Image (cartoon, grey):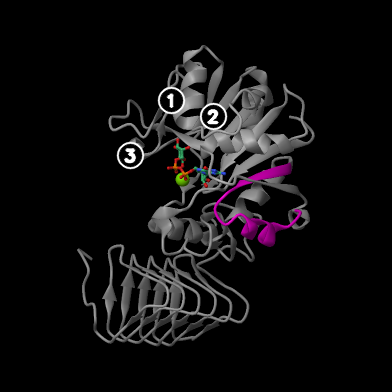
Amino acid sequence: MPAALEAILLVGGQGTRLRPLTLFTPKPLLPTAGVPFLAHQLARARAFGVRRIVFATSYKAAMFADAFGDGSAFDLEIEYVTEDTPLGTGGAIRNAARALTCPPDAPVLVLNGDILSGHDIGAQVRQHLSGDAALTLHLTEVEDASRFGCVPIDEDGRVLAFLEKTPNPVTNRINAGCYVFRRSVIDQIPDGQVVSVERETFPTLIESGGRVLGYADSSYWLDVGTPAAFVQGSCDLVLGALQSPALPGPPGESLLLPDAVVSPEAKVTGGTVVGARAIVGSGALVRGSVIADDATIAPGVTVVNSVVGRHATIAGGTILRDAVIGDTAVIGPNNELTSGARIWPGVTLPESAIRFTGDA
Ligand code: GDD
Ligand code: MG
């Protein structure tokens, strides 16, 4: 394990599937278990020996430096490299590599910026070094591999193919979005062009006989790219299902941020976070949800597996289940929003406007 491992963090995506949450905040900065999502990834990377991280930014780039500065709060050195127009995952890695300081044969960790993973990064790096690999991919297993990069391996862990978002996956084993590259492999990606590592770099490297290994394990893993997964990730962190050094408090049924006011007659469970200065009224039932700063949940409201945005207000008798309420929205009394309903920021919904939106 090198003493000062360098990493590149891919955080330039638009987070389209998480709208409206990502209209004003990039996905990696969404408040998750009380801190920006990336804080969990940064703290874990630091714990495994990463000392310097280059952020490959594009969408809302300036917000990352505002949030993390020079990285000293994490005992990390953070550099920012911004693409004027998005260069794709491969182009972004190549572009960010100009801020690396390590020699050509050194290992470089590359992380997708929307993953919660409990895997042992140190073990992945060690496998890469002992196997003298060009590239070592962290692999996990999921039920539906068609939404990911499908990665068959042989019995020695050698990667046989890389099939991005294929309709008929040949295995449930997928690319978990954490790579160890030999630095010289990054330097061979064409510069200043749009390149996808998943559709171009990885398949080409494998087909040309490059030594690509899979580090397969079954630790906690989640891509928080959809509202349901985002809520689940936040709750899992609060509950301690994935331990994070960045969790601002002990794991438990709920996390109350400073000056949150929760009525003793409210029930707040399932890893719910209640944001700073947010209010939860008596008789309210909030389970497995993310309540953002300054939101108001009136007495008697039910919120399950949902997100309530900053300064949003939910009036009495309303039920939210698998719903996303944008910042500053006002949901009148006795509405029922379920099954993936999304209310855009600033919208006002009158009393009893929506009673049912799907198969609750
Ligand atoms: N800088 C930069 N520039 N970053 C980008 C760009 C870009 O043009 N495009 C995407 N990213 C970043 C995103 O911000 C995210 O952190 C990461 O690259 C992956 O992009 P996603 O949009 O989240 O991809 P995905 O979830 O559909 O698929 C990827 O992740 C899966 C695991 O969650 C692929 O790598 C799959 O193979 C993998 O299975
Ligand atoms: Mg993703």
Q: State which quadrant residue 325 falls in.
A: bottom left
Reading the image, the residue beneath label 1 is 162
Please, what is the three-letter code of the amino acid marked with disc 3? Asp
Quadrant in which the C terminus is drawn:
bottom left
Left or right placement of residue 358 versus residue 287 in this view:
left
Residues at circles 1 and 3 in contact by the CB criterion of under 8 Å: no
Quadrant in which the N terminus is drawn:
top right
Reading the image, the residue beneath label 3 is 144
Q: Is residue 128 above or below residue 349?
A: above
Tell me the SS state at disc 3.
Answer: loop
Query: Marks 2/3: CA distance?
Result: 19 Å
Q: Nearer the viewer, mark 1 or mark 2?
A: 1
- In this rendered view, identify the residue nearer to me: 353 or 237: 353
Dot 3, crowdedness within 10 Å: few (<14), some or many (≥20)?
some
Determine the residue positioned at 43% across, 78% down: 267
Please, what is the three-letter code of the amino acid marked with disc 2? Leu
Reading the image, the residue beneath label 2 is 137
Name the N-terminal-most of marks 1 and 2: 2
Under 8 Å from ligand 1: the CB of mark 1? yes
Q: State which quadrant residue 300 falls in.
A: bottom left
Residues at circles 2 and 3 in contact by the CB criterion of under 8 Å: no
Segment tinted magenta in the rendering: 52-70
Q: Is residue 355 above or below residue 2?
A: below
Determine the residue positioned at 62% across, 18% down: 131
**Is 63 one of the magenta-colored residues?**
yes
Instruction: Give x and y (percent) for residue 79.
Output: 72, 47
- Is residue 157 in view from this perspective? no
